[in-house]
Image: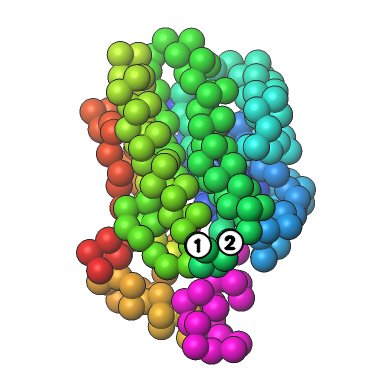
Amino acid sequence: MKLAGKVAFITGAARGQGRSHAVTLAAEGADIIAVDLCAPLDTVGYPLATPEDLAETVRQVEALDRRIVARVADVRDTASLRAAVDEGVAELGRLDIVSANAGILSSGSTQELTEAAWREMIDINLSGVWRTCKVAIPHVIAGGRGGSLILTSSVAGLKSYPNVGHYVAAKHGVVGLARTLATELGPYGIRVNTVNPTQVDTDMIQNDVMYRLFVPDSLHPTREQFAAASRATGLLPVDWISSRDVSEVVLFLASDAARYVTGISLPVDAGATLR
C-alpha cells in the first residue's frame, strides 16, 4: 500500500471530490481525518453537503478497514478546524497528508457581485485553505518525516473565466499560497502542490447555476446543453472528468512516487488550459 502508516486530513470530505479523496487514500492504507461544514450557505445556489453525507464517507472509509475521525467544522473558523485536527491526531497518532479541498461556487459579473458573495468566496476558497494549512502544518512538522500538502485550486487558478471573478481570484490565490508554502516548508521535507481540475462531475457543477453560466443564452439550460458547452472547453473528447480522476492525482502527490515534486500546479483538465 502506497500510504500505509500515514494519516490524511481532508476538508470538504462529505461528498464529491473530498469523499473520493478520502476513499482513494484509505484504499492505499491511510487513516483519515475528515471535516465538512454540512450546512447551507446563503450565497451558494445549490444544496451543500449534509451530516448524512459525511456519515456515508465514514461508512465507505471504514468498509476499507481504515480508521476515520469525522467532524463537522467550518474552514472559516480556525478554532473548529484546529479542534478537529487536534482530536484526529490524538486518536490516529500523527499527520502526514493534507488535502485542502473544501470549496464553493457562485457566479455573477465582477461589478455586480455582492459584498457577501465576494467575502464568502474568498473566506472559504482561499482563506479557508490557508486556515487548513495553518492548523495542520505543526502536526506534519512534528511527525518528523516530511509530508505532502495538496491544495485544490482549479483551471480557474491558471486562466480567467467571465462571471466568476471572485472564484478566479481565490483559485489564483491558492496557487500563490502553495508556492510560498513550498518554499517555507521544504527544509522540513514537506512538499506543497496544487491540483487544478477542470469541470468535475459533482454537485458543484451539476446544477442550474453552472448550467446557466455555461449556457447563458438559454432560459432553462439542460444537462445535455451544459455537457456540450463543457466539452468545448477542453481538447480531449470528454464532457467533464470524475472525482476519481482527480483523486488519482491527489494520491500521486501524496505518495512517495512524488517525493521530489513540490511547488507545482498540476492540471487535470482534459487540455482546458490550452484553450
Q: Position of residue 50 (x, y in %)?
A: 75, 52
Q: Position of residue 209 (x, y in %)?
A: 59, 72
Q: Which mark identifies residue 110?
A: 1
Q: For the residue carrying disc 1, how many other residues have a C-alpha within 10 Å: few (<14), some (14-19), or many (20+)?
A: few
Q: Position of residue 225 (x, y in %)?
A: 48, 86
Magenta: main secondary structure: loop
- Within the magenta stretch, is there residue 220? yes
Number of marks present in the image shown = 2
Residue 203 can be seen in this image: yes
Q: Is residue 155 left or right of residue 101?
A: left
Instruction: Please say if 43 is above or below 131.
Output: below
- Within the magenta stretch, is there residue 62? no
Image quadrant holding the N terminus, namely: top left
Residue at mark 2 = 113
Along the viewing direction, whichever of 59 and 191 lies nearer the viewer: 191
Circles 1, 2 touching at the beta carbon (< 8 Å)? yes
Image quadrant holding the C terminus, namely: bottom left
Distance from Cα at disc 1 to Cα at disc 2: 5 Å
Q: Which residues fall within the magenta stretch?
A: 201-224
